[in-house]
Amino acid sequence: ATIEVADFTSLAETAGRGEAFSTIAMGAIKTMDALIAVVRNFEDKYLGSPSPLEDFRRIRDELILSDLMLVENRLERIAQGRKRGLKMEDTDREEKMWFRILDGLNRNVPIRDMGLSWEDERLLRGFQCSTRKPLMVILNSDEVRYGRNQAFFEKLPGTYGAMEFAGKFEM
Protein backbone atom coordinates (compact mmCIF):
# COMPACT_ATOMS: atom_id res chain seq x y z
CA ALA A 1 0.00 0.00 0.00
CA THR A 2 1.13 3.51 -0.77
CA ILE A 3 0.16 6.66 1.08
CA GLU A 4 0.59 9.94 -0.73
CA VAL A 5 0.53 13.09 1.40
CA ALA A 6 -0.28 16.52 -0.01
CA ASP A 7 0.22 19.68 2.03
CA PHE A 8 -1.98 22.70 1.34
CA THR A 9 -1.72 26.38 2.13
CA SER A 10 -2.26 27.25 5.75
CA LEU A 11 -5.26 29.22 6.96
CA ALA A 12 -2.96 32.14 7.72
CA GLU A 13 -1.96 32.50 4.07
CA THR A 14 -5.57 32.68 2.84
CA ALA A 15 -7.06 34.60 5.79
CA GLY A 16 -7.06 37.96 4.01
CA ARG A 17 -9.23 36.54 1.24
CA GLY A 18 -11.84 35.12 3.65
CA GLU A 19 -11.37 31.53 2.50
CA ALA A 20 -9.81 28.49 4.11
CA PHE A 21 -8.34 27.11 0.87
CA SER A 22 -7.32 28.50 -2.48
CA THR A 23 -9.32 27.41 -5.52
CA ILE A 24 -6.40 25.22 -6.63
CA ALA A 25 -6.16 23.54 -3.21
CA MET A 26 -9.93 22.97 -3.12
CA GLY A 27 -9.76 21.26 -6.51
CA ALA A 28 -6.96 19.01 -5.28
CA ILE A 29 -8.82 18.20 -2.05
CA LYS A 30 -11.69 16.81 -4.11
CA THR A 31 -9.36 14.18 -5.60
CA MET A 32 -8.06 12.91 -2.24
CA ASP A 33 -9.34 9.69 -0.65
CA ALA A 34 -9.13 11.01 2.92
CA LEU A 35 -8.28 14.28 4.65
CA ILE A 36 -6.28 15.29 7.71
CA ALA A 37 -6.77 18.76 9.15
CA VAL A 38 -3.86 19.93 11.30
CA VAL A 39 -4.95 22.85 13.48
CA ARG A 40 -2.56 25.12 15.35
CA ASN A 41 -2.60 25.18 19.14
CA PHE A 42 0.48 27.24 19.98
CA GLU A 43 1.44 30.91 20.21
CA ASP A 44 2.93 32.43 17.10
CA LYS A 45 4.56 35.84 16.92
CA TYR A 46 2.80 36.56 13.60
CA LEU A 47 -0.53 34.80 14.14
CA GLY A 48 -0.98 35.43 17.87
CA SER A 49 -2.96 33.18 20.18
CA PRO A 50 -4.30 29.91 18.83
CA SER A 51 -7.99 29.31 18.16
CA PRO A 52 -8.04 25.68 17.05
CA LEU A 53 -11.80 25.14 17.23
CA GLU A 54 -12.45 28.27 15.17
CA ASP A 55 -9.78 27.21 12.67
CA PHE A 56 -11.30 23.74 12.37
CA ARG A 57 -14.80 25.17 11.90
CA ARG A 58 -13.44 27.35 9.10
CA ILE A 59 -12.02 24.28 7.38
CA ARG A 60 -15.26 22.34 7.88
CA ASP A 61 -17.36 25.24 6.61
CA GLU A 62 -15.24 25.58 3.47
CA LEU A 63 -15.64 21.86 2.73
CA ILE A 64 -19.40 22.11 3.30
CA LEU A 65 -19.63 25.17 1.06
CA SER A 66 -17.79 23.30 -1.69
CA ASP A 67 -20.28 20.43 -1.44
CA LEU A 68 -23.23 22.84 -1.37
CA MET A 69 -22.07 24.27 -4.70
CA LEU A 70 -21.70 20.77 -6.15
CA VAL A 71 -25.21 19.78 -4.97
CA GLU A 72 -26.82 22.96 -6.28
CA ASN A 73 -25.10 22.52 -9.66
CA ARG A 74 -26.25 18.92 -9.88
CA LEU A 75 -29.85 19.85 -9.00
CA GLU A 76 -29.77 22.56 -11.69
CA ARG A 77 -28.58 20.03 -14.28
CA ILE A 78 -31.32 17.60 -13.33
CA ALA A 79 -33.92 20.38 -13.67
CA GLN A 80 -32.50 21.46 -17.04
CA GLY A 81 -32.59 17.87 -18.24
CA ARG A 82 -36.23 17.59 -17.29
CA LYS A 83 -37.06 20.81 -19.16
CA ARG A 84 -35.45 19.36 -22.27
CA GLY A 85 -37.46 16.17 -21.86
CA LEU A 86 -34.51 13.95 -20.96
CA LYS A 87 -35.46 10.86 -19.02
CA MET A 88 -32.49 9.47 -17.19
CA GLU A 89 -32.45 6.29 -15.16
CA ASP A 90 -32.57 6.92 -11.40
CA THR A 91 -33.18 10.68 -11.89
CA ASP A 92 -36.06 10.88 -9.39
CA ARG A 93 -34.17 8.88 -6.78
CA GLU A 94 -31.01 10.92 -7.38
CA GLU A 95 -32.88 14.22 -7.11
CA LYS A 96 -34.45 13.19 -3.79
CA MET A 97 -31.04 12.15 -2.51
CA TRP A 98 -29.51 15.51 -3.49
CA PHE A 99 -32.32 17.38 -1.70
CA ARG A 100 -31.69 15.30 1.46
CA ILE A 101 -27.98 16.05 1.20
CA LEU A 102 -28.69 19.74 0.60
CA ASP A 103 -30.82 19.83 3.76
CA GLY A 104 -28.05 18.18 5.80
CA LEU A 105 -25.32 20.44 4.45
CA ASN A 106 -27.46 23.50 5.21
CA ARG A 107 -27.49 22.27 8.82
CA ASN A 108 -23.66 21.88 8.75
CA VAL A 109 -23.86 18.08 8.70
CA PRO A 110 -21.10 16.55 6.55
CA ILE A 111 -22.24 13.92 4.05
CA ARG A 112 -20.25 11.22 5.89
CA ASP A 113 -22.50 11.79 8.95
CA MET A 114 -25.85 11.64 7.10
CA GLY A 115 -26.32 7.87 7.27
CA LEU A 116 -26.94 7.45 3.55
CA SER A 117 -28.33 4.20 2.23
CA TRP A 118 -26.26 1.92 0.00
CA GLU A 119 -28.41 3.11 -2.93
CA ASP A 120 -27.48 6.72 -2.17
CA GLU A 121 -23.82 5.74 -1.85
CA ARG A 122 -24.06 4.06 -5.27
CA LEU A 123 -25.52 7.23 -6.80
CA LEU A 124 -22.73 9.32 -5.23
CA ARG A 125 -19.85 7.22 -6.57
CA GLY A 126 -18.97 9.50 -9.46
CA PHE A 127 -19.05 12.73 -7.45
CA GLN A 128 -16.12 14.19 -5.52
CA CYS A 129 -17.90 15.32 -2.35
CA SER A 130 -15.39 16.74 0.13
CA THR A 131 -17.47 16.09 3.25
CA ARG A 132 -18.03 12.46 2.28
CA LYS A 133 -14.32 11.69 2.71
CA PRO A 134 -12.97 10.47 6.06
CA LEU A 135 -11.51 13.39 8.00
CA MET A 136 -9.04 13.20 10.85
CA VAL A 137 -8.21 16.21 13.02
CA ILE A 138 -4.75 16.63 14.50
CA LEU A 139 -4.39 19.24 17.23
CA ASN A 140 -0.85 20.57 16.85
CA SER A 141 0.04 21.72 20.38
CA ASP A 142 3.12 23.11 22.02
CA GLU A 143 4.48 21.56 25.19
CA VAL A 144 2.60 24.07 27.39
CA ARG A 145 -0.84 23.22 25.97
CA TYR A 146 -0.31 19.52 25.27
CA GLY A 147 -2.70 17.26 27.18
CA ARG A 148 -4.88 20.17 28.36
CA ASN A 149 -7.35 20.26 25.50
CA GLN A 150 -10.24 18.00 26.48
CA ALA A 151 -12.68 20.87 25.83
CA PHE A 152 -11.49 21.07 22.22
CA PHE A 153 -12.15 17.38 21.64
CA GLU A 154 -15.56 17.54 23.37
CA LYS A 155 -16.64 20.53 21.24
CA LEU A 156 -15.36 19.06 18.00
CA PRO A 157 -18.47 18.78 15.83
CA GLY A 158 -19.27 15.66 13.83
CA THR A 159 -17.67 12.25 13.87
CA TYR A 160 -14.00 12.82 13.32
CA GLY A 161 -11.00 10.82 14.29
CA ALA A 162 -8.95 13.18 16.42
CA MET A 163 -5.61 13.19 18.18
CA GLU A 164 -3.17 15.63 19.70
CA PHE A 165 0.42 16.05 18.61
CA ALA A 166 3.01 17.81 20.78
CA GLY A 167 5.40 19.07 18.19
CA LYS A 168 4.51 22.60 17.23
CA PHE A 169 5.34 21.68 13.65
CA GLU A 170 4.69 23.69 10.54
CA MET A 171 4.88 22.01 7.14
Image (cartoon, rainbow, N blue to C red):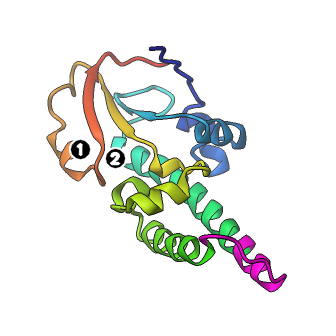
Span colored in magenta: 77-90
User: Residue type at mark 2?
Assistant: Leu
Q: In the rendered view, would you say 79 is above or below 9?
A: below
- 10 Å neighbourhood of mark 2: few (<14), some, or many (≥20)? some
Asked if residue 13 lies left or right of residue 35, the reply is right
Q: What residue sits right under mark 2 in the picture?
A: 53
In reply to whether residue 136 is colored magenta, the answer given is no
Figure quadrant of residue 28: top right
Q: In the rendered view, would you say 122 is above or below 2?
A: below
Q: Are marks 1 and 2 in contact (CB under 8 Å)?
A: yes
Asked if residue 45 lies left or right of residue 16, the reply is left
149 or 71, which lies in front?
Answer: 71
108 or 30, which lies in front?
Answer: 30
* Label 2: which secondary element: helix
The residue sitting at 37% across, 62% down in the picture is 117
The residue sitting at 42% across, 64% down in the picture is 108
Which mark, by number, is residue 152?
1
Residue 110 visible, this orientation:
no
User: Residue type at mark 1?
Assistant: Phe
